[in-house]
Image: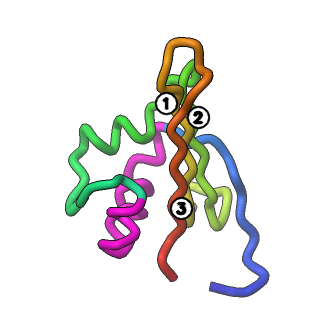
Amino acid sequence: MREDAEFYIRPIRPDDAERERQFIETLSPESRHQRFMHTVHNPSSCFIQQMVNVEYRRTMALVAVLAESDSAQIMGTAQAAATDEHRSNCDFAVAVADI
């Protein structure tokens, strides 16, 4: 990757499913464990769908992509999810590609 590469940050979308799968599968085992707090070998389709179909009242998920195109590669993700009904507490997770 070039030092001057431009990244775009945007909300994750349902059409990111295959890009999200590729991103997760290319993370090192240690990075996967740190992101998901358990071992994720091959993410199921159901798991990927949960990651890319966000219910925005309680959750926000962003991706950093190398280019804004149909072939955009995800280089990082960030997700915040409310953990209580009043949205006063949340879980927050970030993952960055191992390069």
Circle 1 residues within 10 Å: few <14, some 14–19, many ≥20: some
Residue stretch in magenta: 14-34
The image shows residue 60 at horizontal and vertical percentages of 58, 34
The image shows residue 45 at horizontal and vertical percentages of 24, 44
Provide the secondary structure element on which disc 3 rests.
Answer: strand
Compared across the picture, whether 1 is left or right of 21 comes to right
Q: Label 2 to label 1, Cα distance in Å?
A: 7 Å
Which residue is farthest top?
A: 85
Q: Which mark is residue 74?
A: 3
Q: Nearer the viewer, mark 2 or mark 1?
A: 2
Q: Amino acid at mark 3?
A: Ile
The image shows residue 22 at horizontal and vertical percentages of 37, 63
Q: Label 2 to label 3, Cα distance in Å?
A: 16 Å
Residue contact between numbered discs 1 and 3, judged by CB atoms under 8 Å: no
Circle 3 residues within 10 Å: few <14, some 14–19, many ≥20: many
Residue drawn at the location 53% of the way across and 61% of the way down: 74
- The residue wearing badge 1 is 54
Q: Amino acid at mark 2?
A: Met
Circle 2 residues within 10 Å: few <14, some 14–19, many ≥20: some
- The residue wearing badge 2 is 60
Residue contact between numbered discs 2 and 1, judged by CB atoms under 8 Å: yes
Compared across the picture, whether 50 is left or right of 79 comes to left
In the rendered image, residue 21 lying in the magenta stretch gets the answer yes
* Residue 32 in sight from this viewpoint: yes
Main SS of the magenta part reads: helix
Q: How is the image coloured?
A: rainbow
Q: Quadrant of residue 75?
A: bottom right
